[in-house]
Every structure is written in structure tokens, then in C-alpha cells.
Image (cartoon, helix red, strand yellow):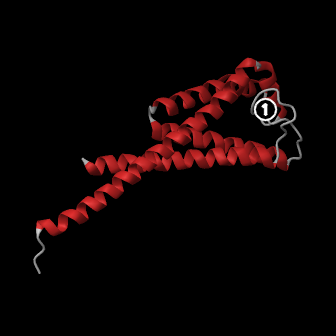
Amino acid sequence: MNVSDEAVAPVTLTVLSKNARGGRVGHVLERLIACSLALLLLRSAFAHLGNPYYFLSSVYAYEITGDRIGKGVALVLPFLQMVIAFNLLTRWWLIETYCLGLLMFLGFIGVQAFSMQRGLEISCGCFGASGSLHIGFSTLLVTGIAALAALTGLCCTIIQDRMEAHAK
């Protein structure tokens, strides 16, 4: 059975248009995730930089690090959050940035879960001097959603990169 080029063309155009639509949806989803995570990270970073001594006391309250490492965490974390947010907004090194953000959120989940398991009832320190926001299910949920969003953004970026490479 011979198939003419005229018979194949509509099928090929249909497949290409579905891939293009999927690429646009993936791009929009990735941008929404990137902007949401960037706003969350910038909110947290500016709260920490606005009251660095409170943030340092929050780091110490987790009772995981000593003085020197605690100071290092309190010094570096707000700037790391700002760099991740900047890279997400500008689309620089997206795969690496999403991986770093995912690792950071997973670290936050681990630290909070470890502190809850030890029975500590402390302020999460996530957004500055909000003493009413203690570590618990709600802070784990927010951090878990942020980690899931970073993973989803990572997957969207990888898929988009592969679609672009395949189209060339």
C-alpha cells in the first residue's frame, strides 16, 4: 500500500500543532512556577535581611548547628534565596537553579521535621519576626508545596529543552 505525501501532511501538522500547544502550556506553567517561587524566596530573603539578628536567633533555635555554622547559615541563606529568585526570574541556568531550589526546600523540610520530632516548639523563622508561625503541619505543607513546585518547574524546563533540541 502506497501512502502519498498529501495523506501524511495533515497527520504531521496535527502532531506538530499538539506539540507546539504543549510547549506553550509547559512554558506558561514553568513561568508561573518560577514567578511564584521567586516571590516566596524574595519575601523570605528580605525579611531575613531586614532583621538579621532575629533570623540568627531563629537559626540557633533549631539547635542543629553551633555558633560558627549558625552564623554562616544566617549570613548565606538570604543571599542564596535572592540568587535563586533572580535566576528564576531571568531564566538563567534554570535546570541548575531549580535543582538548587529543590535541595534547599528539601533541606527546610528535613530541618523542620527533625526539630518537630525532637519536640521543639519554635518559630519557623521563614518570613522574619512572625512569632505566631511555629513549625508544624502548616509550615511543612508550605515548604512541601514549594519543593513540589520546584520539581515541577525542573521537569517543565527539561521537557522544553528536549522539545527545542528535537525541533532543531
Q: Quadrant of residue 64?
A: top right
Q: Residue at x 84, y 35 (%)?
A: 123
Q: Nearer the viewer, residue 131 or 109?
A: 131
Quadrant of the image occupied by residue 75 = top right
Callout 1, which amino acid?
Gly
x and y percentages locating residue 82 in the rendered image: 59, 26
Element type at marker 1?
loop
Which residue carries the number 1 mark? 125
Q: Residue at x 66, y 48 (%)?
A: 145
Q: Which residue lies most toward the bottom here?
A: 1
The relative height of residue 158 versus residue 49 in the rendered view (above or below) is below
Expressed as whole percent of the image width and height from the top left, the position of residue 156 reads 46, 48
- Front residue of 167 and 81: 167
* Marker count (numbered): 1
Q: Please, is residue 1 above or below residue 38 in the view? A: below
Q: Could you tell whether 23 is left or right of 11 in the image?
A: right
